[in-house]
Image (cartoon, helix red, strand yellow):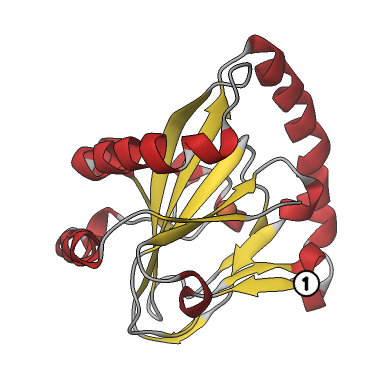
């Protein structure tokens, strides 16, 4: 499974979004609205809660990320986006899961915390903000069996990431993806039975 890297946001943009998120931190909730609660953390649906942030990310991703992934017969679109807020008093981590879309663009928004990082247990890989860089993103296929991933716990501070979901536009892929999701979801239950793979 290939994981791409790309620059996306400037440090100023990250600081602006971070401060905005912190001003409105009560909208970050652990809820079934953004997926199953047992594999969720404190999240915000950006198109609903922070539409300007979603629009900014959509424009940047269409310019910088689509050229890495798209071909003339494989058009992509930005489906939705979520902000994740990790803290010691809410959720310090997120259990491993599959995102379930064609691609996930995962943006690392800030430093100033201890711990954290994105763990891909089946790839034996952990990516941290030090590896990726503030404002930069990693892009991975959300329906590859090896993409099973979670957020490692922080032990101090506040950590934000943003997950932007991309989907292929063709009906063929939409039908194919429904079958893939159906097959992958039971693996989440199965893999989470192994305590050594847990992140929470
Ligand atoms: Fe995820």
**Quadrant in the picture for residue 16:** bottom left
- What's the residue at 61%, 45% (across, down)? 99
Q: Where does residue 112 sit, x and y in percent of width and height? A: 33, 84
SS category of the residue bearing label 1: loop
Residue 176 rendering spot, x and y as whole percentages: 75, 21
* In the image: residue 123, left or right of residue 170: right
Depth check: 148 or 91 in front? 148
Picture layout, residue 162 above or below residue 131? above
The C terminus, quarter of image? bottom right
| Nearer-the-camera pick, 18 or 67 | 67
Return the x and y of residue 141 as percentages of the image width and height.
66, 44
What residue is drawn where x is 58% and y is 18%? Answer: 72
| Image side of residue 97 versus residue 88, left or right | right
Query: Circle 1 is placed at which residue position?
Result: 124
Q: Vertically, is 174 above or below 61?
A: above
x then y, percent, for residue 120:
70, 65
Q: Using the image, determine if residue 148 lies above or below residue 111.
A: above
Residue 114, can we see it?
A: yes
Q: Residue furthest top?
A: 171
Crowding at dot 1, Cα within 10 Å, few <14 / some 14-19 / many 20+, comes out as few
- Number of marks present in the image shown: 1
Residue at 46% of width from left, 74% of height from top? 129
Observer-nearest of 18 and 186: 18
Could you tell whether 41 is left or right of 2 in the image? Answer: left
Residue 199, visible in the rendered structure: no
């Amino acid at each position: 499974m290939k994981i791409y890297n790309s620059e996306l946001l400037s440090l100023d943009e990250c600081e602006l979004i971070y401060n905005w998120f912190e001003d409105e931190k009560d909208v970050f909730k652990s809820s079934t609205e953004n997926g199953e609660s047992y594999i969720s953390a404190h999240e915000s649906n950006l198109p609903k809660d922070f539409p300007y942030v979603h629009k900014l990310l959509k424009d940047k991703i269409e310019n910088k990320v689509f050229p890495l992934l798209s071909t003339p017969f494989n058009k992509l679109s930005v489906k939705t986006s979520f902000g994740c807020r990790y803290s010691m008093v809410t959720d310090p981590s997120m259990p491993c899961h599959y995102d379930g879309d064609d691609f996930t663009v995962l943006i690392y928004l800030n430093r100033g915390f201890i711990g954290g990082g994105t763990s891909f247990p089946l790839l034996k890989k952990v990516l941290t903000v030090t590896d990726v860089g503030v404002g930069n993103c990693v892009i991975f296929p959300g329906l590859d069996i090896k993409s099973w991933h979670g957020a490692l716990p922080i032990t101090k501070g506040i950590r934000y990431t943003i997950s932007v979901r991309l989907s292929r536009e063709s009906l063929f892929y939409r039908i194919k993806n429904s079958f893939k999701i159906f097959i992958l979801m039971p693996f989440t239950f199965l893999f989470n039975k192994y305590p050594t793979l847990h992140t929470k």
